[in-house]
Amino acid sequence: MPERGRPRTFDRTAALRQAMELFWAKGYEGTSIADLTAAMGIGSPSLYAAFGSKEALFLEATDYYTRTEGTEIWTALDEAPTACQAVENFLRQTARAYSQNDRPQGCLIALGALHQDSSSGAICDDLRRRRAENHTLLLRRLERGVAEGELPADFDSDAAATFYATVQHGMSIQARDGASCDALMATVAGAMAAWQGLAGTA
Amino acid sequence: MPERGRPRTFDRTAALRQAMELFWAKGYEGTSIADLTAAMGIGSPSLYAAFGSKEALFLEATDYYTRTEGTEIWTALDEAPTACQAVENFLRQTARAYSQNDRPQGCLIALGALHQDSSSGAICDDLRRRRAENHTLLLRRLERGVAEGELPADFDSDAAATFYATVQHGMSIQARDGASCDALMATVAGAMAAWQGLAGTA
DNA sequence: TGAATTATGTATCGATCAACACAGAAAAGA
DNA sequence: TCTTTTCTGTGTTGATCGATACATAATTCA
């Protein structure tokens, strides 16, 4: 029975998307309630009634971000036939997604809450957990490569996952500095040049 | 004639160092004047008399940072006999410096002002310029390797410099997430595994 | 139609933000 | 000693922060 009382006059999902883009561009602390209500086109009481608080809105916005933005990055990781191609496509899709100029550059998860603030402890923890999850997804794909015999049994999947996740994080900063897709692709080429050395295959 | 009037009761450089460490740990927007005066042990009028404004203090703190912190990273780059060793030492010193637990993890320059804020435009520009300078230092060292015949004439120094600078930026985020020096060294190993592929030498 | 429920708009809350006014204190030059 | 100069401590400024109180509007249920 969610249809009691006066109905909402705005699209909750559309408002959440506006909030997500604003947090993405300006960060949690750099975005004020006044910024949010202006972008979402609603008053602050409506914001608090619909989302609870600024912190809860940010957490929901990051969840919406992971569900809607950059999904092609992670599908590329799973669908490629080999681990090598999976990682390369993963990085190439990252370069493409991070340099789109119709949205903020870089990744909301990677760039958010990097400074330990007393007020944003929950947000810092949440983003850290999401970054760790990304590392895990990379790790799983590499371990699959070992299981399938593509990679040697002594392949250090964890070290390699850490390396490629770190490269991806660096690409977020590079993108924020205005790097084009081509410039990001140079980093991808560098990272993939490491593959032979890591896999021990000439 | 700087010895006129009532002398300062605090050490300006020591206060600047305190401010630098606070900005390093909490970021520009996350650090308040109240935080600064508490850490520096002075009143706000003394802060403004000595440093001008919060923005000017931050700019001076970043300058102090570049002059005092992580200098071994860049001396390693210049002093190593080969470009390969230079880059490797550069990354290893980075791993060491970023994971010290008696100071904030990661790099103040890399992690600062990544979100475009209307109020911190000058700071954003300054940090971006400093990040570009770091890229230039890497580029110069690689070009020296080409000039000395260590690297082939068609070696893409710019792409390689971008790659290694990006890896270093990613290591800042990794360090902020609590990575140990050993974990950062795994990333260094990955990045150096790319060297042979980039240099075209087996 | 009337009671209950939920959302909106205005107006504002106390807290905190960066920055400063002012008066008193501590030094140098006369 | 007296003036000038500079720094320090207290207190406060207007602005903005995140978050609500309150009255009104719009809907469902009885």
Image (cartoon, coloured by chain):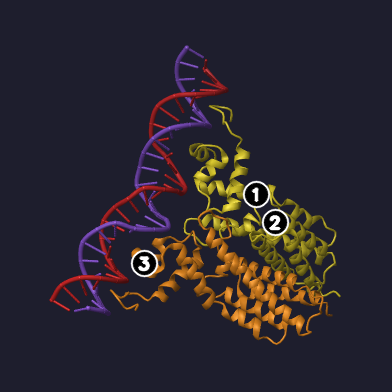
Chain colours: A orange, B yellow, C red, D purple
- Which class describes the residues within 10 Å of circle 2: few (<14), some (14-19), or many (20+)? many
Residue A7 picture quarter: bottom left
From mark 3 to mark 2, how far is it between C-alphas?
Answer: 43 Å
Q: Secondary structure at mark 3?
A: helix
Q: Position of residue B74 (x, y in %)?
A: 74, 55
| Outermost residue, bottom side | A81
Q: Could you confirm whether marks 1 and 2 are on the same chain?
A: yes
Quadrant location of the C terminus of chain B? Answer: bottom right
- Asked whether, in this view, residue B85 is left or right of residue B127, the answer is right
Mark 1 or mark 2, which has the lower sequence index? Answer: 1
- Count neighbours of disc 3 (C-alpha within 10 A) and say few if under 14, some if 14 to 19, many if 20 or more: few
Chain for numbered disc 3 = A
Label annotation for residue A49: 3
Q: Which chain is mark 1 on?
A: B
**Residue B197 found in image quarter:** bottom right
Find disc 2 in the rendering and name its residue: B98
Q: Nearer the viewer, mark 1 or mark 2?
A: 2
The residue at the point 58 percent across, 45 percent down is B19
A8 or B93, nearer to the observer = A8
Residue at (77% x, 65% y) in the render: B143
Tag 1: residue type?
Tyr
**Residue under label 1:** B65
Q: Are marks 3 and 1 on the same chain?
A: no
